[in-house]
Image: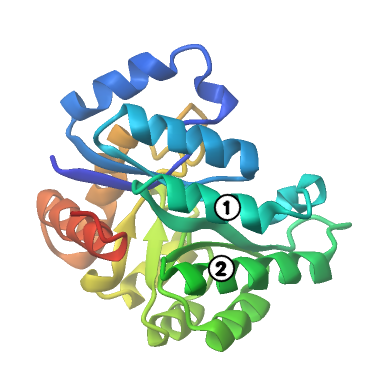
Amino acid sequence: MNIFDTHAHYADRAFDDDRGQVLDELPGKGVKFVMLAASGLEDSVENMRLAQKYDYIYAAVGVHPENIDETPGDYLDRLRRMTASEPKIKAIGEIGLDYHYEGYDRDAQIRFFCEQLKLAAELDMPVIVHSRDASEDTVDILREYRPRGVVHCFSGSAETAKEILKLGMYIGFTGVLTFKNAKKALKALEAVPLDRLLMETDCPYMAPEPFRGKRSDSSMIAYTAAKAAEIKGITTQELIDITSKNGITMYEID
């Protein structure tokens, strides 16, 4: 089915028992490409290893806002060395802001976000942006740095989506589109033109209906794409083909 899962976490511990089996089977389930997003330096290294092992897998490196406290001071140099050593690293991410929980150091998050945006500009690479309960600051920073890339697992309003689109970025949606309480996500989807739309799982999280609450994998994008296709008035395969092409373009995959 030509699926491009533009955001997955196969380095996650949820796959420790059967990672090899899952990844061996995905191409036979219609998955053509997978982009692995990183949550920190350890994930970044594992993503690189998996990309080297599997032809259809590509990798991103970066530090998620939830993991900045455990990140060493030389992290930018480490990320820089990784991107120089492995051509299948195609993005910096996931990076961004997460204000969901109390007690997070917002100033530190903003600093890490901006530092990694500068690194992406230096390396001429797209970014994978995480934004949860932080739309205003996220959009302000994106306006300042003007990166290429995607705001993934989009949870903002249609109005926020339009502001991100004005910056030339893509917007990624997960299985949340299939949830019964997904009115806000569906409204945002309506605002995103097909040429700026990406499909993703964020696996092992965000499994679509009818798998909600279970471990997700890239083959489940078919269910998310079916819902998105219904909203866009095209077939599921057409939507998968369009969004796969968008992912190839954004990540500059040959």
Horizontal and vertical percent position of residue 62: 58, 53
Residue 86 in the image: above or below residue 92: above
- Res 228 → quadrant: bottom left
Residue at horizontal 20 percent and vertical 57 percent from the top: 229
What whole-number distance in Å separates the C-alpha atoms at marks 1 and 2? Answer: 9 Å
Residue at horizontal 50 percent and vertical 58 percent from the top: 92
Residue 29 in the image: above or below residue 160: above
Q: Is residue 210 visible?
A: no
Q: Nearer the viewer, residue 96 or 100?
A: 96
Residue denoted by label 2: 119
Horizontal and vertical percent position of residue 175: 40, 46
Q: Residue furthest right?
A: 103
- Res 135 → quadrant: bottom right
Q: Secondary structure at mark 2?
A: helix
Q: Amino acid at mark 2?
A: Leu
Q: Nearer the viewer, residue 149 or 210?
A: 149
Numbered label attached to residue 79? 1
Q: Is residue 40 left or right of residue 74?
A: left
Q: Secondary structure at mark 1?
A: helix
Residue at horizontal 65 percent and vertical 80 percent from the top: 136
Horizontal and vertical percent position of residue 95: 59, 60
The crowding category of the residue bearing disc 1, from other C-alpha atoms within 10 Å (few below 14, some 14 to 19, many at least 20), is many
Residue at horizontal 42 percent and vertical 83 percent from the top: 162
Horizontal and vertical percent position of residue 203: 46, 37
**Label 1 with label 2: CB-CB less than 8 Å:** yes
Residue 189 in the image: above or below residue 240: below
Nearer the N terminus, badge 1 or badge 2?
Answer: 1
